[in-house]
Amino acid sequence: MLSIIPGNKISSLDSTYIKEEGISSWDLMERAASAFCNLLFEKLLMVPDDVFIFSGPGNNGGDGLAIARLLSLRGKKVSLIVFEQNQNCSKDYQINFEKLPSQVQVFRWDEFGFAFNDHDLIIDGIFGVGINRPVEGKYREVIEKLNEAKGIKIAIDIPSGIPSDSLLIGIAFKADYTFTFQFPKLALLFPEHAEYSGVIEVADIGIPDHFLEQFGENRYFLTGDDLKSLHLTFNRFSHKGDYGKVLLIGGSKGKVGAVLLASKAALRTGSGLVFALVPEDERLILQIGAPEVILANQDEIKGLQIFDALGVGPGWGQEIDISFYESLLKRYHKPLVIDADGLNLLSAHPRLIELVPNGSILTPHIKEFERMTGKVDHHLDRLQKARDFSEKHNVYLVLKGQFTSITCPDGRQFFNSSGNQYMATAGSGDVLTGMVTSFLGQGYPPLNAALCAVYHHGLAGELASETRLRGTIAGDIIESIPASFLKLGIA
Ligand SMILES: NC(=O)C1=CN([C@@H]2O[C@H](COP(=O)(O)OP(=O)(O)OC[C@H]3O[C@@H](n4cnc5c(N)ncnc54)[C@H](OP(=O)(O)O)[C@@H]3O)[C@@H](O)[C@H]2O)[C@H](O)CC1
Ligand SMILES: [K+]
């Protein structure tokens, strides 16, 4: 799994790695530049002929110079805009400057006209992870102009101005794409920076995971490559008991659909038996909506231990008998999944949090999370509060949003890479609840259940929205769960 390394450790990572590999820092920059160009030709349907590259004084600028050379060699008309005298720039910047082909036209920033067309390509190599103060002066002037300019805009490693691990102060380059090296920088995952980072693509520069791990701080980026090894395998002798017996509890007048969605999602994720407990009057809706689901009644659920996992909260409302919730938490001793009103009720009755079994998985969206932890100032604060909460209550916290984070009681934090904006639709969270509950019931350890569910949920959303875009609904995500397994080669 890709470790997310803090910006202030990246130069030690680089120097240790190049020493061990026996390569030069220029070689690594060359790898970065060619990985960038490869992504460019892979991700853009048409790479524009006119390319404008802005190179700052550090190695991000050095990358820009190397990219200028490589694109010029591939027949592009490249203009390079620089800010400093060569002798004030990094060593590899200077080497790459010497290597520029004569076809690359070089401008000083104050000699350049800043007139662009819609189909020009603008590449931002002004600052990378070495930024150490807000952008001012000539750099600010240029970035402001670029943000107003036409053209397709791509940031090298990180949009200039965004600090690698904290919140932007002042201005930054607004990219359509960010091609980031080896792993996404933490700040790229903050919702506050979405308008700057655009679509994030990771360019592999060949530094192995185990090497990154030594410099990481327990933060990881979850990708499709990680998924297969997290799954349990089943065979033709497996029977429905092996696939788990789960119980979903929730629903209220007008909101029984939430349990219906969660139940169907659990079935599509592979649960052997799905039971649902909803108010008496709402049972028929559920039974018609999903004949595969078994309706439980209050008496049956007295023997809660027969269930391999519980998913509590979808559509429950705030009006439930709180003593029932309390007794549920007291009687069930295995990890369970809590969502939606199950979480809101914990916020309203904080004493209940102490009863939540160790290793349970809580799946709040941002507002539910704030109800549990108090007001959050920004995403970094949220991530810290998630760590404090998980550790204190010994639970896994799945904080839903773009790059959903999964926080473990030991402080590890995983960021999901799958999913898109089309999943922001009613019931999408209920689908996730059903999926996590299903994996948990199949015998997955809580962390793997959360990781697999979050990744498949995102991928199913991507697949469902391929043809439906903004018309994607939660039911479509459910129907695409099997396709997500198929895509990852998981039987
Ligand atoms: N393993 C990898 O990921 C690799 C990444 N590469 C690229 O290298 C950059 C990081 O390069 P670095 O030289 O450390 O830093 P930057 O290029 O981002 O910028 C440093 C220079 O910028 C000056 N600086 C910093 N902040 C400001 C500011 N606000 N205003 C003006 N100038 C600023 C700083 O000067 P000082 O005045 O602070 O001394 C530096 O001159 C990484 O992002 C990748 O793109 C490698 O190419 C390969 C391996
Ligand atoms: K940049």
Image (cartoon, rainbow, N blue to C red):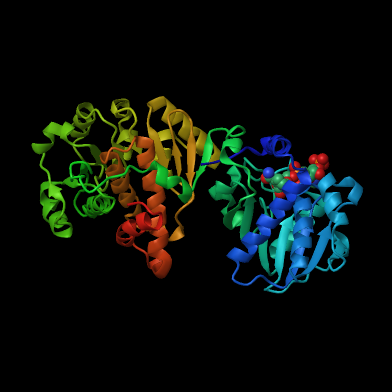
Find residue 8 and report its horizontal and vertical position in percent: 69, 36
Please tell me which residue is depicted at 21% across the width and 52% down the height of the picture: 256
Count of numbered badges drawn on the protein:
0
In this rendering, position of residue 51 left or right of residue 177: right
Nearest the camera: 44 or 255?
Answer: 44
Find residue 347 and report its horizontal and vertical position in percent: 34, 34
Q: Is residue 379 visible?
A: yes
> Looking at the picture, does residue 3 appear above or below residue 266?
above
Find residue 265 and report its horizontal and vertical position in percent: 27, 52
Please tell me which residue is depicted at 41% across the width and 43% down the height of the picture: 229
Q: Is residue 127 visible?
A: no
Based on the displayed image, in which of its 4 quarters is residue 103 positioned? bottom right
In this rendering, position of residue 325 left or right of residue 175: left
> Looking at the picture, does residue 255 appear above or below residue 53?
above
Nearest the camera: 310 or 245?
Answer: 245
Nearest the camera: 78 or 241?
Answer: 241
Based on the displayed image, in which of its 4 quarters is residue 11 positioned? top right
In what quadrant does ligand 1 lie? top right
> Looking at the picture, does residue 454 appear above or below residue 78?
above
Please tell me which residue is depicted at 63% across the width and 37% down the height of the picture: 6
Find residue 86 and report its horizontal and vertical position in percent: 89, 51
Based on the displayed image, in which of its 4 quarters is residue 124 positioned? bottom right
In this rendering, position of residue 467 left or right of residue 200: left
